[in-house]
Amino acid sequence: IHLCDTCVEKPCLKSCPVDAYSVDGFAHQACLALVRGPRGEPCRSGGCLDRNACPYGAEYRYPADIQAFHMAAFAGV
């Protein structure tokens, strides 16, 4: 059983400005466009909004500066 399957609220699916995560999968290009653009500053500075909205494993999340490093690498910025 995947934890996402048991999550009723699914806050992760409501946090991304471009709905990058859905039941259809990950919208890679939409995410990249957001992160690279002016509206992507929150993602660039603190990590993926959807992933950070997940209530499971919050205590194991990387700090914001590490998430920002990974997001910059992902976006090539």
Image (cartoon, helix red, strand yellow):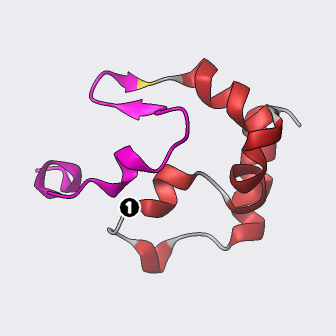
- Tell me which segment is drawn in magenta: 1-25
Residue 7's quadrant in the figure?
Answer: bottom left
- Whether residue 38 is in magenta: the answer is no
Q: Residue at x 67, y 74 (%)?
A: 63
Q: Residue at x 84, y 32 (%)?
A: 76
Q: Position of residue 75 (x, y in %)?
A: 77, 34
- Quadrant of image for the C terminus: top right
- Left or right: where does residue 25 sit relative to residue 16? left
- Left or right: where does residue 41 sit relative to residue 29? right
Depicted 36 relative to depicted 43: above or below: above
Depicted 71 relative to depicted 56: above or below: above
Q: Residue at x 83, y 39 (%)?
A: 38
What residue occupies the far bottom of the structure in this picture? Answer: 59
Q: Position of residue 58 (x, y in %)?
A: 43, 74
Q: Position of residue 54 (x, y in %)?
A: 38, 61
- Left or right: where does residue 56 sit relative to residue 66? left
What residue occupies the far right of the structure in this picture? Answer: 77
Q: Identify the residue position indicated by label 1 in the image.
A: 54
- Left or right: where does residue 58 sit relative to residue 64? left
Residue 18's quadrant in the figure?
Answer: top right
All told, the count of numbered labels is 1
Q: Residue at x 78, y 50 (%)?
A: 41
Q: Tell me the SS state at disc 1.
A: loop
Residue 56 versus residue 37: which sits nearer the camera?
37
Given the image, on which type of amino acid does mark 1 rest?
Cys
Residue 53's quadrant in the figure?
Answer: bottom left
Residue 64 versus residue 19: which sits nearer the camera?
19
Depicted 4 relative to depicted 77: above or below: below
Depicted 6 relative to depicted 16: above or below: below
- Whether residue 14 is in magenta: the answer is yes
Q: Position of residue 55 (x, y in %)?
A: 34, 69
Q: Counting other residues with Cα less than 10 Å from the Cα at mark 1, is it few (<14), some (14-19), or many (20 or more)? A: some
